[in-house]
Image (tube, rainbow, N blue to C red):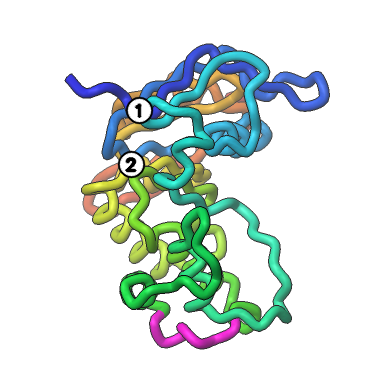
Amino acid sequence: MSSPIIEVRNLWFSFNGHTALKAVNLMLDAREFTAIIGPNGGGKTTLLKLLLGLLRPDQGTIRIFGKSPGQAAHRIGYVPQEIGFNKNFPISAMDVTLMGTLKSGKGWAGYSKNDRAAAEETLERLGMSEFRDRRIGELSGGQRQKVFIARAIVNEPEILFLDEPTASIDTKGQTEFYNLLRRLNETTTILMVSHDLMIVSSYVSSVACVNQAVHYHNSAEITEEMLDMHCCPVELVTHGKLPHRVLRNHEDF
């Protein structure tokens, strides 16, 4: 039996004396597609940043491929919730995508033909090839997000972390994006923060509910236990010929 590629043991983390995450234990195997759900302020983004090594736990251990997050960083792709940039900076969609091919010790002039071919192919997969030479500041919010996603996956990471990646993408683009993730998941482990539980029933293989504590469910099924841990109504997806969403009443909370 193979060992988990992500191991979190007894993790605690606080901001300015306020507990953000407590007693977190989480084990994820290769090629899982895990949705991270929970209320605003529950610690979802904080958990991702700890797994990436951008934050350090107050207590506990994190191992990615048996190493610290920093040592495993070159095997991980990441799309944050918000990416700050200067809209007037003269950098194209292709330039941004190529940044994902950079490795330690490799300078700006070090892009190879293979790097450029990979960037071109990735933009094509995301429907952004025609915008390859467009300045990033001239793109719409959804188009920019696709470019940032291209940057994260161009180097074929073994793990992909996504924090609300479809927030700026229209409905048609979201469907295309989730289908891309499904294909990537054949070789890549994916953790994605999302408020839209539609993905839980359609795409993911497991769910981690985060509200200071973390409850892991090795299934995409939405259970009463998972709903009860939220501090506000969440969307429940029902199946059938026409999938639809059901909102729990606020009076139930």
- Please state, as top left, top right, bottom left or bottom right, where the N terminus lies in the image: top left
Residue 208 position by quadrant: top left
How many C-alpha atoms fall within 10 Å of the one at disc 2: few (<14), some, or many (≥20)?
many
Residue 134, position in %: x, y?
Answer: 54, 86
- Taking the magenta stretch, the answer to whether it contains residue 111 is no
From the top left corner, tell me how far across and down residue 237 is, in percent.
38, 42
Q: Is residue 233 visible?
A: no
Considering depth in this image, is 138 or 111 the residue closer to the camera?
111
Amino acid at pointer 2: Thr
Q: Residue at x 29, y 29 (%)?
A: 29
Magenta span: 129-135
Residue under label 2, please give it.
Answer: 189
Report the residue marked by disc 1.
28
In the figure, 7 relative to 109: above or below? above
Snapshot quadrant of residue 72: top left
Regarding mark 1 in the picture, which secondary structure is present there?
Answer: strand
Residue 194 to residue 82: above or below: above
Question: Disc 2, disc 1: CB below 8 Å?
Answer: yes
Q: Tell me, yes or no, if residue 219 can be seen here.
A: yes
> Looking at the image, is mark 2 or mark 1 earlier in the sequence?
1
- C-alpha distance separating marks 2 and 1: 9 Å
Q: Position of residue 56 (x, y in %)?
A: 64, 28
Quadrant of the drawing holding the C terminus: top right
